[in-house]
Image (cartoon, rainbow, N blue to C red):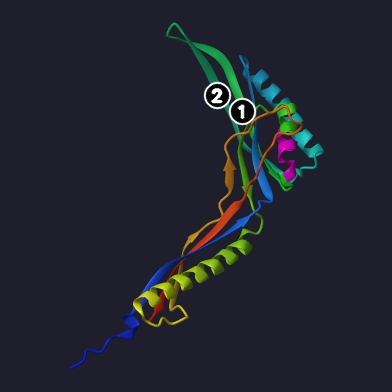
């Protein structure tokens, strides 16, 4: 008696990967003004004046006000240790803003202008892409084609005929994260060089075929 094979149980399951490299078109940078004085009111006043100068300089560059937002404001007492004794130094006031830049070529100029007008910390430079979803759809198509190719390769090696249409598709991973730049360096050039590089938008699919 021949045992009947359940065809539905004959499966090939593969992981398909797709990736699209995209030039970033949006940058965000965190600019910070840090001041210190023995008198808190003096440190606060100096900080407020300097940060206002920074913001006004950015507005003059054409950065829309809605693209500038405060991300933190902190006040911290600072101490030195002399001969094992804690000596009060004063109060440190820190005000940080996040600036969204829609012209990538202007990133270096924005940083230089902010520093020239009093910003003394620059951090968290990130590059992103507007309309990431459009590119991700392309990565999904690539991932599906990659899965189909893998399934055909496996089927050929097993000498079986795989159905061309998958019976199950699961998206298991999404990509397209911003590319961070950790630091910047002030140089003798006219503008601080900042390179956005590329953003790799990826998709991963778990695809099941029958044969």
Question: Image point 71% across, 29% down: which residue?
Answer: 115
Residue 9 in the image: state x and y as whole percent.
32, 80
Few, some or many residues within 10 Å of mark 2 (<14, 14–19, 20+)? few
> Mark 1 sits on what residue?
94
In the depicted view, which residue is nearer to us: 174 or 164?
A: 164
- From the viewer's perspective, is 74 left or right of 81? right
Question: Image point 58% across, 46% down: which residue?
Answer: 179
- State whether residue 4 is above or below residue 179: below
- State whether residue 116 is above or below residue 63: above
Residue bounds of the magenta highlight:
105-111
Q: Secondary structure at mark 2?
A: strand
- State whether residue 23 is above or below residue 162: above
| Comes first in the chain, label 1 or label 2 | 2
> In what quadrant of the picture does the C terminus appear?
bottom left
Residue 123 in the image: state x and y as whole percent.
61, 35
Residue 120 in the image: state x and y as whole percent.
66, 26
Q: What secondary structure is the stretch in magenta mostly built from?
A: helix
Distance in Å between CA atoms under marks 1 and 2: 8 Å
- From the viewer's perspective, is 54 left or right of 71? right
Residue 74 in the image: state x and y as whole percent.
58, 29
> Mark 2 sits on what residue?
76
Outermost bottom residue: 1
Q: Secondary structure at mark 1?
A: strand
């Amino acid at each position: 008696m021949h045992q009947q094979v359940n065809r539905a149980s004959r499966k090939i399951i593969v992981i398909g990967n797709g990736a699209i490299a995209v030039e970033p078109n949006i940058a965000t940078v965190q600019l910070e003004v840090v001041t210190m004085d023995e008198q808190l009111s003096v440190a606060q006043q100096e900080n407020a004046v300097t940060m206002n100068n920074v913001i006004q300089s950015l507005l003059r560059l054409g950065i829309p006000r809605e693209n500038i937002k405060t991300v933190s404001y902190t006040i911290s007492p600072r101490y030195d240790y002399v001969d094992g004794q804690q000596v009060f130094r004063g109060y440190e006031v820190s005000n940080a803003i996040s600036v969204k830049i829609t012209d990538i070529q202007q990133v270096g100029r924005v940083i230089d202008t902010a520093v020239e007008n009093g910003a003394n910390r620059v951090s968290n430079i990130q590059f992103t892409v507007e309309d990431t979803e459009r590119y991700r759809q392309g990565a999904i198509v690539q991932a599906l084609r990659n899965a189909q190719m893998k399934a055909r390769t496996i089927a050929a090696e097993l000498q079986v005929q795989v159905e061309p249409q998958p019976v199950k598709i699961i998206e298991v991973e999404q990509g397209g994260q911003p590319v961070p730049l950790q630091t910047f360096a002030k140089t003798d050039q006219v503008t601080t060089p900042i390179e956005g590089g590329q953003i790799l938008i990826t998709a991963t699919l778990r695809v099941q075929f029958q044969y």
